[in-house]
Amino acid sequence: MNDRNMKRSGHVHADKVDWQDMGDSTRRKILGYVPEMLMMRNVFDAGAEGPLHSHPHVQSSYVVSGLFDITIGGRTERMGPGDGFLVEGGVEHAARCIDAGEVIEVFTPIRDDFL
């Protein structure tokens, strides 16, 4: 999946995709992408932080496990298993992992910088 021009659609078996260690107490696994969308799994150690940032992509996230303080547009809420959040393009947001956990994220359009 290292070829930026490759469209990764169809059936994606998680056990056949390698984890990418992000070096900041997080790791991710890209589960599929086409030019219009990218989906991935993120695993966070307790204490991991995603600093305040923005990007032009719409981001939809689902908390599988753990506890996270999620800041969107200056408002912070604690999110846990089964919760979700949506970030419109250009809106500043951040995350802080309270209890180790996993988040599924979908971006539209594709995040070329993640490939």
Image (cartoon, rainbow, N blue to C red):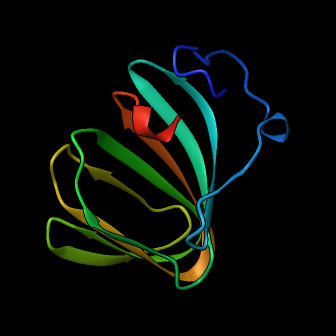
**x 58%, y 14%: residue:** 6
Please provide percent x and percent y for residue 103: 55, 58
The answer to which quarter of the image holds residue 31 is top right
**x 38%, y 46%: residue:** 60
Side of 14 where 46 appears, left or right: left
Side of 26 where 54 appears, left or right: left
Please provide percent x and percent y for residue 92: 19, 61
Q: How many marks?
A: 0
**x 46%, y 62%: residue:** 83
**x 59%, y 83%: residue:** 46
Can residue 111 be seen in the rendering of this structure? no
Looking at the image, is 44 positioned above or below residue 99?
A: above
Looking at the image, is 109 positioned above or below residue 113?
A: above
Can residue 5 be seen in the rendering of this structure? yes
Instruction: Look at the image and tell me in which quarter the N terminus lies.
Output: top right
Please provide percent x and percent y for residue 84: 42, 57
Looking at the image, is 98 positioned above or below residue 32?
A: below
In-front residue for pair 104/48: 48
Please provide percent x and percent y for residue 115: 53, 34
Side of 90 where 115 appears, left or right: right
The answer to which quarter of the image holds residue 25 is bottom right
- Residue furthest to the right in view is 15
